[in-house]
Image: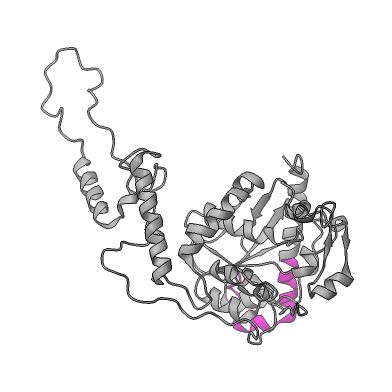
C-alpha cells in the first residue's frame, strides 16, 4: 500500500484523490411503489409508527346496574370523528406497514417486513434509489448500516448519550469530538448516537482522512454512510446545505496515541474547523467520548512495519497481533457520549474567518470544553466495563 496522504482539514485547496461517485438513479419512481421510509414521520409514544385509536366499548363509570342507557351512550366521544377522519387520511398517505393494525410479532407484521425487504432489494437491483453528489445513500444507511451497528452500540458498548438536546433541530452545525481507540469505532458510535437519539432524526456526516477512501470496500461503505474527505471545501458545502458535520481534529495523533496518554487531548491542528464554521455561520457543538480509549489498549507501535504497510501506525495491544484475528475484537467497555452546549459563530463578521487570533481562541475554547467534560465523566464513571 502506498503511503497514506492525509489532507489537513484546514487546507482550502480542492480535493485531489478520491472522486465523488455519479448520482445513481436509473429512472423515475414507479407508480404505486409507495413513499420512502425516511419520508414517514412517526408519532411519538406509540407502538409502531402511529398512535392507535382510543379503546372503545367501555361502560360508563358509576352506571347503576340495569340503568337505561343515556342518549349519549354509545355515541362517539367528542373529537372521535376527527380522529377517525385523521386516521383514514393517514391510511391514504402512509404505507400499510406503518399502521399498527396487528400486535408486534404477529403474522401480519412478518408479512409486512418481508414485503418491505423485497421492495428494498428490488430498488437495489433496479437502481431506483438516490445518492447525493458525495455518494451518501440515506436508504441504505437507515435500513442496513445502522441496523448492523446498532447491536454493537446497544449491547456491546452499551452507549449512554447525554446532551443530545444541544444539537440544533435543523440547519448546519459542526460537531467536534475527541478521537481515540486505535480503530475509529468512536466516529461510528457517534453517528449512531445522533441517528437514534436526536428527536428530529438527524444524520451525522463524518469527515475522514483520505486513507479511509484508499481502502477497498471501506471506501464504498464510507461514501454510502455519508462520510467525506476532511477538507474545508467538503465541510463548507455540507454545512451550507444545513447538514450535521462531525470532525475529530486530533486525527491520527489522537486515535493512535499510546494507552499511557489516554483521555489527554492532542493538538487540534491550526483551527481549520473553526474557520469553516465562521464562514458558514454554523454553531460548534463540542462532544466528549469516554470508553473508546480502552477498547484496544495500545502498548506499543511497530513503526517500521507501519512504514512498510503505508499506514500511520501499527498498534501492539495485549491481544493484537498475538491472538491473530481474535486480537482485533475490541474489549466490551462501557461508553458515554456527551454533547456540550453549542458555541455560536453567526455573530462574527465575514472577515472573522481570516483572523488567526480569533480562530486560536475559539479552537482553544472548544478543546478545553471537551477536555473538562472528559475529566468530569471519568470521575463519574464507576468502572471501565460497567
| Image location (x, y in percent) of residue 63 | 21, 17
Above/below status of 385 relative to 206: above
Going by the image, does 31 lie left or right of 359?
Answer: left
* Residue placed most toward the observer, 31 or 271: 31
Quadrant assignment, res 301: bottom right
Give yes or no for residue 86 being in the magenta stretch: no
| Picture quarter with the C terminus | top right
Above/below status of 139 relative to 327: below
Going by the image, does 368 lie left or right of 199?
Answer: right
| Picture quarter with the N terminus | bottom right
Above/below status of 96 relative to 225: above
Above/below status of 17 relative to 73: below
Q: What are the residue bounds of the magenta stretch?
A: 344-365
| Image location (x, y in percent) of residue 316 | 85, 59
- Secondary structure mostly seen in the magenta stretch: helix
Q: Residue at x 57, y 77 (%)?
A: 280
| Image location (x, y in percent) of residue 295 | 75, 52
Quadrant assignment, res 210: bottom right
Numbered-mark total:
0
Q: Residue at x 40, y 41 (%)?
A: 47
Give yes or no for residue 358 being in the magenta stretch: yes
* Residue placed most toward the observer, 284 or 321: 321
**Residue 234 seen in this snapshot:** yes
Going by the image, does 48 lie left or right of 351?
Answer: left
Amino acid at each position: 500500500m502506498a503511503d497514506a496522504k492525509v489532507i489537513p482539514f484546514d487546507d482550502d485547496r480542492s480535493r485531489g484523490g478520491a472522486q465523488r461517485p455519479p448520482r445513481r438513479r436509473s429512472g423515475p419512481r414507479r407508480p404505486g411503489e409507495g413513499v420512502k421510509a425516511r419520508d414517514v414521520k412517526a408519532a411519538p409514544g406509540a407502538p409502531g409508527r402511529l398512535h392507535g385509536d382510543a379503546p372503545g366499548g367501555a361502560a360508563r363509570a358509576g352506571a347503576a346496574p340495569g340503568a337505561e342507557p343515556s342518549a349519549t351512550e354509545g355515541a362517539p366521544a367528542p373529537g372521535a370523528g376527527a380522529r377517525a377522519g385523521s386516521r383514514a387520511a393517514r391510511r391514504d398517505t402512509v404505507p400499510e406497514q406503518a399502521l399498527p393494525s396487528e400486535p408486534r410479532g404477529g403474522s401480519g407484521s412478518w408479512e409486512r417486513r418481508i414485503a418491505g425487504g423485497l421492495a428494498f432489494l428490488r430498488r437495489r437491483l433496479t437502481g431506483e434509489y438516490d445518492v447525493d453528489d458525495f455518494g451518501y445513500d440515506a436508504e441504505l444507511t437507515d435500513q442496513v448500516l445502522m441496523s448492523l451497528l446498532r447491536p454493537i452500540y446497544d449491547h456491546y458498548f452499551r452507549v449512554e448519550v447525554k446532551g443530545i438536546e444541544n444539537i440544533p433541530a435543523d440547519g448546519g452545525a459542526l460537531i467536534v469530538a475527541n478521537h481515540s481507540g486505535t480503530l475509529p469505532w468512536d466516529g461510528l458510535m457517534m453517528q449512531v448516537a445522533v441517528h437514534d437519539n436526536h428527536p428530529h432524526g438527524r444524520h451525522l456526516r463524518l469527515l475522514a482522512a483520505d486513507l479511509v477512501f484508499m481502502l477497498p470496500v471501506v471506501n464504498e461503505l464510507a461514501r454510502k454512510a455519508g462520510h467525506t474527505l476532511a477538507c474545508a471545501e467538503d465541510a463548507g458545502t455540507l454545512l451550507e446545505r444545513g447538514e450535521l458535520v462531525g470532525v475529530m481534529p486530533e486525527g491520527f495523533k489522537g486515535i493512535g496515541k499510546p494507552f499511557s496518554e489516554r483521555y489527554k487531548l492532542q493538538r487540534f491542528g491550526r483551527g481549520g474547523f473553526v474557520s469553516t464554521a465562521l464562514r458558514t455561520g454554523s454553531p460548534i457543538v463540542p462532544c466528549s467520548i469516554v470508553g473508546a480509549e480502552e477498547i484496544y489498549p495500545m502498548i506499543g507501535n511497530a513503526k517500521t512495519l507501519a512504514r512498510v504497510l503505508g499506514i500511520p501506525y501499527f498498534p501492539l495491544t495485549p491481544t493484537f497481533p498475538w491472538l491473530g484475528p481474535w486480537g482485533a475484537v475490541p474489549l466490551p467497555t462501557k461508553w458515554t457520549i456527551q454533547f456540550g452546549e453549542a458555541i455560536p459563530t453567526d455573530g462574527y463578521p465575514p472577515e472573522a474567518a481570516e483572523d488567526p487570533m480569533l480562530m486560536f481562541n475559539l479552537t482553544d475554547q472548544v478543546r478545553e470544553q471537551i477536555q473538562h467534560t472528559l475529566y468530569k465523566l471519568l470521575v463519574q464513571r464507576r468502572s471501565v466495563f460497567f
